[in-house]
Amino acid sequence: MHTEKKHIIIAVTGSIASYRSCELVRELTKKGYPVTVLMTENASRFVGPVTFQSLSSRKVYHGNFSEEMEHIDIKNLAGVFCVAPATANMIGKMANGIADDLISTSYLAVNCPVIAAPAMNPQMYASKPVQRNLEILKQDGVHIIEPVHGTVVCGDTGQGKLADLEIIEKEILKFYNTSLNEN
């Protein structure tokens, strides 16, 4: 079993690709890694918190805020922070320091490697604002796992589909293991 000191934080945002995060959480948990899931309100429209709680065997943080300082709890838990899928909305919040939900406030608080795996309509992904925000995140040290080319749920084709889960998992574990070795 891997250390319980630091967790892999999977932050799930409101994209149709959020269902793929279930498999990511399942695989990491099955391999013995401690995984904690954060969800936006919009993500819970696609996949319920109970699903992630069942897959991770841990409390799922969802919604905007609570009376507790959950973003600080998450900061203290985080060995790596991965937003998968990362919507245009969340990418914009992260790039501009907007802290109006649990994921964006947690992102600003964490002191660990951060990964973002965008997933959205290809035209949205290619838009100047999204590309500008991704560049800002890269300058801030966020590791971006580029989406792949394909046909998305609306029928459009282009770069915008969530990257293969094996690639995301490999990057998470690379940064997680590096983070553990530094502590």
Image (cartoon, helix red, strand yellow):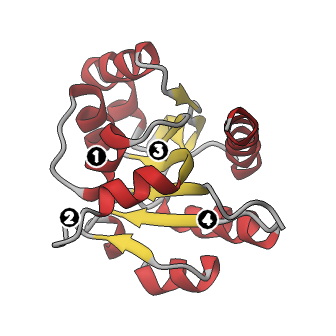
Q: Quadrant of the C terminus?
A: top right
- Does any portion of residue 153 appear in the rendered image? no
Tell me the SS state at disc 1.
Answer: helix
Q: Amino acid at mark 1?
A: Ser
Expressed as whole percent of the image width and height from the top left, the position of residue 64 reads 20, 64
Query: In front here: 9 or 129?
Result: 9
Expressed as whole percent of the image width and height from the top left, the position of residue 129 reads 25, 22
Residue at which label 1 appears? 104
Please report whichever mark, 3 or 2, sits nearer to the chain's N-terminal start: 2
Q: Residues within 10 Å of mark 3 (few under 14, many from 20)?
A: many
**Mark 4 vs 1: CB contact within 8 A:** no
Q: Residues within 10 Å of mark 4 (few under 14, many from 20)?
A: many
Q: Residue at x 84, y 68 (%)?
A: 1
Residue 48, above or below 118: below
Q: Residue at x 41, y 41 (%)?
A: 110
Left or right: 20 as drawn, with respect to 63: right
Query: In front here: 32 or 5?
Result: 5
Q: Amino acid at mark 4?
A: Val
